[in-house]
Image (cartoon, rainbow, N blue to C red):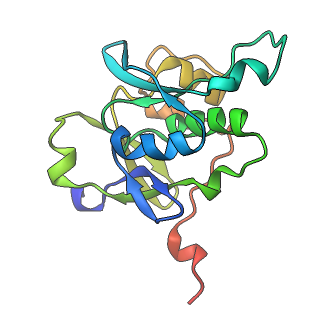
């Protein structure tokens, strides 16, 4: 069963390569105008946030704070789909007219024993109709879950509560995209 488990990862669309760490992500984010902030710890998990310097002039008088473009630190692979979605929603908020798919997309990939065992984190299942994806336990925080599903949960890593039918998410396999 372990050989069939897959994880999600951010891929750089231009090079079609997975981005596994913030060291790989930061240069791309800086070309988009984002600045990396120091890591912060929330509920025992380290997060790295990216700020958009001109965010203050985008919506003067806005009541709600802008979304936060942040991902767990140091690795950004094997996260829950809602974590990636919240990150991309924040980027879209600041980049407005740019299509995020021109820069990033999320794809599934096999677990890599050399990298994934190193953290000794428990993986939790995130079921999709055609396969099982796993994500690192603790990388889906309550704020992201609430923003993505509109519901609050006492256990933010409970996969049955994080797969809400009210939130449309579609995972498209590469074999369904490429015409042979």
The residue most toward the right is 61
Residue at image location 42% in from the left, 50% down from the top: 8
The image quadrant where one finds the C terminus is bottom right
Residue at image location 23% in from the left, 55% down from the top: 112
Callout count: 0
Q: Position of residue 100 (x, y in %)?
A: 65, 50
Q: Is residue 89 above or below residue 143?
A: below
The residue most toward the bottom is 180
**Res 58 → quadrant:** top right
Residue at image location 51% in from the left, 29% down from the top: 35
Q: Position of residue 128 (x, y in %)?
A: 50, 52
The image quadrant where one finds the N terminus is bottom left
Q: Position of residue 140 (x, y in %)?
A: 44, 28
Q: Residue 51 or 160: which is nearer the viewer? A: 51
Compared across the picture, whether 155 is left or right of 32 comes to left
Residue at image location 80% in from the left, 9% down from the top: 63
**Res 102 → quadrant:** bottom right
Q: Is residue 150 above or below residue 64?
A: below
Q: Residue 53 or 78: which is nearer the viewer? A: 53
Q: Position of residue 142 (x, y in %)?
A: 51, 18
Q: Residue 26 or 13: which is nearer the viewer? A: 26
Compared across the picture, whether 68 is left or right of 26 comes to right
């Amino acid at each position: 069963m372990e050989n069939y488990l897959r994880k999600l990862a951010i891929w750089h669309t231009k090079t079609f390569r997975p981005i596994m760490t913030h060291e790989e992500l930061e240069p791309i984010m800086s070309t988009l105008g984002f600045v990396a902030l120091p890591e912060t710890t929330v509920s025992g998990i380290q997060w790295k946030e990216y700020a958009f310097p001109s965010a203050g002039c985008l919506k003067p008088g806005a009541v709600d704070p802008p979304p936060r473009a942040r991902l767990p630190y140091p690795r950004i692979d094997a996260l829950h789909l809602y974590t990636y979605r919240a990150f991309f929603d924040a980027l879209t908020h600041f980049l407005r007219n740019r299509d995020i798919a021109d820069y990033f997309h999320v794809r599934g990939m096999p677990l890599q024993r050399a990298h994934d065992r190193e953290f000794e984190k428990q993986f939790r299942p995130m079921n999709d109709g055609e396969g099982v994806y796993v994500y690192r336990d603790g990388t889906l925080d309550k704020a992201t879950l609430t923003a993505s599903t509109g519901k609050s949960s006492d256990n933010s890593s409970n996969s049955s509560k994080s797969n809400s039918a009210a939130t449309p998410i579609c995972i498209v396999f590469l074999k369904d995209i490429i015409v042979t």
